[in-house]
Amino acid sequence: MHASPQQRAADHRPYFFLSYAHTPRDVAGGPDPDMWVERLFRDLSGHVMAMTDLPAGAQAGFIDREMRSGEGWSERLAEVLATCRVFVPLFSPRYFASEMCGKEWYAFAQRVIYEQAKGNSTADAIVPALWVPVPPAQLPGPAERLQFNHRDFGDRYVTDGLYGLIKLRIFAEEYERAVYELAKRIVSVADTAAIGPGRPVDYRQAPSAFGTSGGPRPMQVTVAAPTRHDLPEGRATRYYGSMAQDWNPYHPESVRPLAYVARDLVRSLNYQADIISFDEVPIPAEGKGAPTRPEILLVDRWALHDEEQRRRLAAFDAEHRPWVSVVVPWNRDDQQSRAAEAELTDQLERTMPRKMGQGRAACRAAAKGVPSMEAFGQILPQVVEAAAQQYLRHAAVYPPAGGGRTGRPRLRGPMAAEYTTTHHLPETHDLAPDAEDTDDRTS
């Protein structure tokens, strides 16, 4: 979708947000190590102003060097991330180690995901720039998935990055070309994607798009919902499709099935997410073995009108699966759901009493009902993190071969690498058998 001339004329939002990792000074009072980033920002802004019809006084871009820490700092940052048209992350090893940069990335990425859900588009509005080249193996999932050809900006740019080009005079021409091409791409993407303003993200709650150390972690998104062919009598078909995964409770605000919106939000948190129907979940769990991945279970309360689905959900609830977080989306503008609210809520609480009262406050709130797309996006990161933490607590560990007590147990499964870098594993003789969690209700 392209913005019309009339829309562009009335839109004075910054074209880009330059996101970068601050480099610490060597000594107090020493030269500013980020002065070269500021020069890049000025050069980019000049090109963008020349390529657009922004009026005098409007900001072509934004960089947080213009701000000072203190009261209102995070609010101002959130406001700009909610309105700028394109996000330009300045790749470097330090960038992906920065929690603040990860928060900035997530704040913008969730805006893009909502825009895609509303218009069923695939347009992205993240234009990465290489400050210092980063090996592909070191890129977190959200960066690795970007479809972007850096070689369009020149071979020297790919091998040395903008930092190398800007620091060495012999590469002045290559630097000018790379910045010019980057500015052209920013303007083109801003016009094509046409991402509308969003609601500012609360930085106190915002997660990092880069997750913890290690590669993308596995996460399963499971959908328990009817299809349009097996709905309760009289239930509107517009929220359903030919598969459970087609369920779209937030219609007409969203035109995409919720499972795919959830998958994209989960991926933006550096997870590898798969989508399945609840009908594919074995109940009871085969062999009562250890979990293989954390899980988000999306439940449509209308599914409880089906006796078989109600029986399977009740059996699922009876099993101890704290690594599964239940989210119950519903649309406050869905008149049928509002009229049947008391009945649907009562049936869910009788069917899944354990999940209704399990976990952190955010998990319990998600299980009680999420009435809008905005609320869904706000609560999902907290629910995802809770499921991941519970998975790490319950995944199988086993002692090293030989049965001795000198080694440490190892985690088995796809999240083993993350666990060993973020958790202290007890000695083998300290391990206790699996028991009922004692802190499921801690917030």
Image: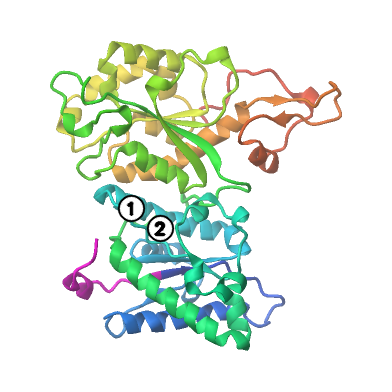
Give the image location of residue 368, x and y in percent: 35, 29
Quarter location, residue 74: bottom left
Q: Earlier in the sequence, mark 1 or mark 2?
A: 2
Magenta part of the chain:
1-16
Query: Tag 2: residue type?
Result: Phe
**At 48% from the left edge and 12% from the top edge, which residue is drawn?**
284
The image shows residue 144 at horizontal and vertical percentages of: 52, 54
Residue drawn where x is 46% and y is 73% of the image? 63
**Of residues 224 and 229, which is closer to you in this image?**
229
Looking at the picture, how far across and down is residue 141, in whole percent? 52, 50
Q: Is residue 95 magenta?
A: no
Q: Quick check: marks 1 and 2 in contact, CB under 8 Å?
A: no
Question: Residue at point 49% right, 77% down?
Answer: 178
Determine which of the numbered discs, if any, sits on residue 108 in the image.
Answer: 2
357 versus 202 height, above or below: above
Give the vertical position of 22 relative to 135 (above or below). Answer: below
Residue under pointer 1: 122
Q: Which mark is residue 24?
A: none
Classed neighbour count for the residue bearing mark 2: other residues with Cα under 10 Å, few (<14), some (14–19), many (≥20): many
Q: Against 380, is 51 above or below? A: below
Please state which amino acid type lies under the numbered disc 1.
Thr
- On screen, residue 154 versus residue 50, left or right, reads right
Question: Which element is circle 2 on?
Answer: helix
- Helix, strand or loop at label 1? It is loop
Residue 400: x percent and y percent?
80, 27
Is-magenta flag for residue 10? yes
